[in-house]
Image (cartoon, rainbow, N blue to C red):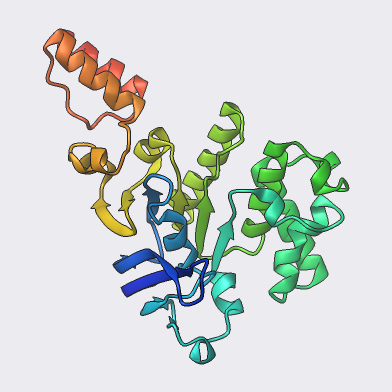
């Protein structure tokens, strides 16, 4: 396993001395180094971001331990290993791209990761340009300040900055928030390609249940700092637990429910897009 949580808890400091707010309770979780596409879901305050922030030691546990590849992370800060090797293997794309953009130009920003992890200037530039091509970042943007870009362009540059040093696992916090529908589809298609063709594990926090149902191989639903569900998306939405976690069914499943009820059909949930639904309806109606 690439990441293994053992009885992990996390507390945030409260407003008063010795006061704390519990955010995670007794988390036990294993994540493979390859081929997983995991969506972490739950309402605001459920513990999603806190959970994912432990996966590359951005936060340290208050109790329990986390094995990240060959590194054991515990609450004892002084005994923990250096964090840079962990960050090299597990890249984190933040929800707000301006949090991770700081260089003078787009190209320099994308090159920063490879340079920081020991690549030569020439190697860093090559990797940056390759990633720009993958993400569709135009050449005329490379010499601009990242802060003069649109929100969607900034998001792409932030993603490129992580992909440029080729981490083993990608952590994504709301990767399509703020993107127009076309760009959001393009970005998710890239992550799906990275997962399917390069066998990298992708872990994303999202509120978009359509994204969950279309792309996830596994979904972790959080509630009140605990894992309420861990399994396949189709099983989550067949289980009343999705309502307890304040989640909505994806649009395609709501449509299936409507058709089953209004036309007295018996369509199963193994349908993931409109084309598959139309094909299934043709078979049923014939």
User: What residue lies at 32% left-to-right and 30% top-to-bottom?
Assistant: 272
73 left or right, relative to 84? left
Using the image as rendered, state which of residue 198 and residue 161 is in the foreground. 161
Give coordinates of residue 219: x percent, y percent: 32, 49
Residue 131 visible in the current orientation? no
103 left or right, relative to 38? right
166 left or right, relative to 104? left
Residue that sits furthest to the bottom in the current view: 79
The quadrant holding residue 28 is bottom left
43 left or right, relative to 6? right
User: What residue lies at 17% left-to-right and 22% top-to-bottom?
Assistant: 267
Give coordinates of residue 66: x percent, y percent: 39, 76
- In the image, residue 58 above or below residue 206: below
Give coordinates of residue 259: x percent, y percent: 21, 14
Look at the image and tell me in which quarter the C terminus lies.
top left
- In the image, residue 281 above or below residue 64: above
Look at the image and tell me in which quarter the N terminus lies.
bottom left
User: What residue lies at 52% left-to-right and 51% top-to-bottom?
Assistant: 173
Using the image as rendered, state which of residue 132 and residue 181 is in the foreground. 181
The quadrant holding residue 276 is top left
The quadrant holding residue 63 is bottom left
Residue 59 visible in the current orientation? yes
Using the image as rendered, state which of residue 43 and residue 32 is in the foreground. 43
Residue that sits furthest to the front in the current view: 16
Give coordinates of residue 210: x percent, y percent: 39, 33
- In the image, residue 279 above or below residue 102: above
User: What residue lies at 38% left-to-right and 40% top-to-bottom?
Assistant: 212
């Amino acid at each position: 396993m690439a990441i293994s949580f053992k009885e992990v808890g996390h507390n945030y400091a409260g407003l008063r001395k010795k006061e704390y707010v519990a955010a995670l309770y007794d988390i036990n979780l294993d994540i493979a180094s390859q081929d997983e596409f995991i969506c972490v879901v739950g309402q605001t305050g459920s513990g999603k971001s806190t959970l994912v922030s432990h996966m590359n030691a951005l936060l340290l546990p208050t109790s329990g331990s986390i094995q990240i590849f060959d590194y054991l992370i515990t609450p004892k800060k002084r005994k923990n290993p250096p964090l840079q090797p962990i960050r090299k293997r597990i890249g984190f794309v933040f929800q707000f791209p301006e949090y991770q953009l700081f260089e003078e130009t787009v190209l320099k920003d994308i090159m920063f990761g490879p340079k920081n992890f020991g690549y030569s200037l020439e190697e860093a530039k090559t990797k940056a340009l390759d990633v720009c091509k993958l993400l569709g970042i135009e050449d005329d943007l490379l010499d601009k300040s990242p802060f003069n870009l649109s929100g969607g362009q900034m998001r792409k540059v932030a993603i490129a900055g992580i992909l440029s040093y080729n981490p083993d696992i990608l952590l994504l916090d709301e990767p399509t928030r703020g993107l127009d529908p076309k760009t959001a589809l393009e970005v998710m298609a890239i992550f799906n390609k990275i997962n399917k063709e390069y066998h990298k594990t992708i872990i994303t926090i999202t509120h978009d249940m359509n994204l969950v149902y279309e792309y996830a191989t596994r979904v972790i639903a959080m509630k009140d700092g605990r894992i309420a569900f861990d399994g396949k998306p189709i099983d989550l939405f067949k289980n009343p637990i999705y309502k307890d976690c304040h989640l909505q069914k994806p649009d395609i499943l709501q449509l299936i429910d409507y058709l089953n009820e209004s036309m007295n059909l018996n369509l199963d949930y193994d349908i993931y897009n409109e084309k598959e639904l139309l094909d299934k309806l043709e078979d049923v109606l014939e």
